[in-house]
Image (cartoon, rainbow, N blue to C red):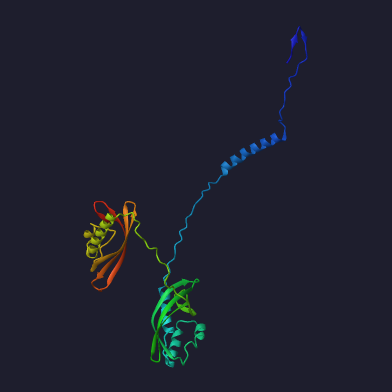
Amino acid sequence: MKIWKKGKQYRTKKIHVMKVGTHRKSIIFLWVLLIGSVIFGIYKNFTAIDIKTVHETKVMEKQVVDTNQIENFVKNFAKVYYSWQNNQNSIDTRTENLKGYMTKELQDLNTDAIRRDIPTSSTVNDVEIWKVKKVDNNKYGVTFSIDQLITESNTKKMVDSSYEVAAYVDKSGNMVIIKNPTICGIPAKSSYEPKTLESDGRVNEATTEEINEFLKTFFKLYPTASGKELSYYVKDDVIKPIGKKYVFSELINPVYQKAGDKVQVLVSVKYLDQQTKAMQISQFDLTLEKDRNWMIVK
């Protein structure tokens, strides 16, 4: 800026400008980063590929294998293997028949299984298949039990035994026994006992008597009732007609439990079967609801 005064000229007075770090390395780096980000964003915008995440649900379906042929093959084999008479012709016939079921190796293994001087004869009464399990692509393990009538001199006795064998099935469906009958166990009675249910005390005595009378009336009618007759006692056909000649005898140990505005009833019902003359005891788990009258709703 120039200052003029009384015709005399003074030197120009410079204004000092403060420069704030325009050439600092950090500022340069930030500018480069900003420009690079913009360029990268533009590049991605033109080259972006839409990526969709696809969630695939695989439904694993169990393949049902028809084991009827294997079961029949093993049954027929067992009948041959466990049947013999205490004479040489019968033993020779058994040995020959086993060639149609067993590998050569197993035939040789069983050469002396039934001795020539064996004192017993065996007749197979029944063979039951308990389990067929696929072991490999063409191999199946089969568990079975057998009932034999063993005769020795004038003595006869029943023998129950269980075994497992392995069978090979080729592509044509032909089969051969590849494992000798091996002793094993089969499922026996479980020790499980269900918890005994008891009335929960929330169904009063008057209601209990009403339900008792309702159930007696219903179960007297039930065996021979038509669908229309049952509709006065049963909602939405939850109990179907059976058309049997049963005579109602009694309710056994009914248990009542409150279930909201309904009552759950567990009861055994004794009938006389007029055809067999035996007592038939059926167990029912019912849900009752009262509108104007009691109805079985489940």
* Residue at 74%, 10% in the rendered image: 4
Image quadrant containing the C terminus? bottom left
Quadrant position of residue 222: bottom left
On the image, the x and y values in percent for residue 292 come to 24, 51
Front-most of 265 and 232?
Answer: 265
Instruction: Reply above or below: 45 against 92.
Output: above
On the image, the x and y values in percent for residue 228 come to 21, 59
Residue 235 shows in this picture: no
Quadrant position of residue 85: bottom left
On the image, the x and y values in percent for residue 172 come to 45, 75
Residue 282 shows in this picture: yes
Image quadrant containing the N terminus? top right
Q: Answer left or right for 202 relative to 173.
A: left
Quadrant position of residue 125: bottom left
Front-most of 37 and 27?
Answer: 27
Instruction: Reply above or below: 278 against 56.
Output: below
Instruction: Reply above or below: 133 against 286.
Output: below
Front-most of 210 and 185?
Answer: 210
* Residue extending furthest toward the top: 6
On the image, the x and y values in percent for residue 192 come to 42, 67
* Residue at 42%, 78% in the rendered image: 145
Q: Answer left or right for 86 relative to 47.
A: left
Front-most of 173 and 156?
Answer: 156
